[in-house]
Image: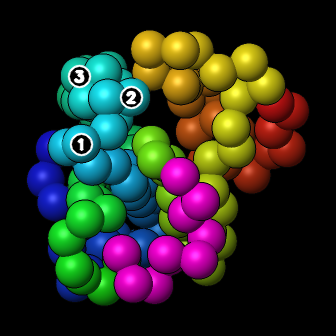
């Protein structure tokens, strides 16, 4: 999974493709535990979802633009066309990774298909 690149993300969105930004930090134990699950999901679902990493401790466009919306890590921001939505927290977070793979997949499907999502 690559770091988010503004030009590529904008190109994909302009083509009507879905982009998922994974906001993380190397110092976050939840992020470190979740990363292999997200990488596996990324490999299984490409090109349906385009996953990119955003390290919150680095400076960059996405870090600055979304710093008010991202209230903790790990966080996911989904974008498609002119829609942007932060994945909600699970009702009962998992202590090791916060999100379960099932929760992430269910949310991504609902966002892509423009359906409502119940936590």
Left or right: where does residue 117 sit relative to residue 11?
Answer: right
Quadrant where the image shows the C terminus = top right
The residue sitting at 36% across, 77% down in the picture is 62
Tell me if mark 2 has few (under 14), some (14-19) or many (20+) residues whose alpha carbon lies within 10 angstroms of its own. Answer: some
Q: Is residue 99 magenta?
A: no
Q: Which mark is residue 36?
A: 3
Q: Would you say the residues marked 1 and 2 are in contact, meaning their CB atoms lie under 8 Å apart?
A: no
Judging by the rendered image, the residue that carries numbered circle 2 is 30
Percent across and percent down for residue 21 are: 39, 56
| Image coordinates for residue 112, horizontal then vertical, percent | 61, 48
Q: Nearest the camera: 77 or 24?
A: 24
Which residues, given as a range, are shown in magenta? Answer: 63-72
Residue ID for mark 1: 27
Which quarter of the figure is the N terminus placed in? Answer: top left
Question: Real-space Cα distance between discs 3 and 1?
Answer: 15 Å
Q: Is residue 21 left or right of residue 70?
A: left
Residue 2 against residue 91 in the figure, above or below: below
Q: Do we see residue 117 in this rendering?
A: yes
């Amino acid at each position: 999974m690559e770091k988010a690149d503004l030009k590529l993300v904008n190109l994909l969105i302009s083509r009507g493709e879905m982009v998922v930004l994974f906001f993380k930090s190397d110092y976050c134990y939840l992020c470190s535990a979740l990363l292999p699950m997200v990488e596996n999901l990324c490999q299984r679902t490409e090109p349906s979802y385009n996953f990119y990493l955003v390290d919150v401790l680095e400076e960059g466009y996405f870090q600055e633009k979304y710093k008010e919306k991202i209230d903790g890590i790990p966080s996911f921001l989904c974008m498609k066309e002119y829609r942007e939505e932060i994945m909600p927290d699970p009702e009962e977070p998992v202590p090791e990774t916060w999100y379960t793979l099932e929760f992430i997949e269910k949310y991504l499907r609902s966002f892509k298909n423009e359906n409502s999502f119940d936590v």
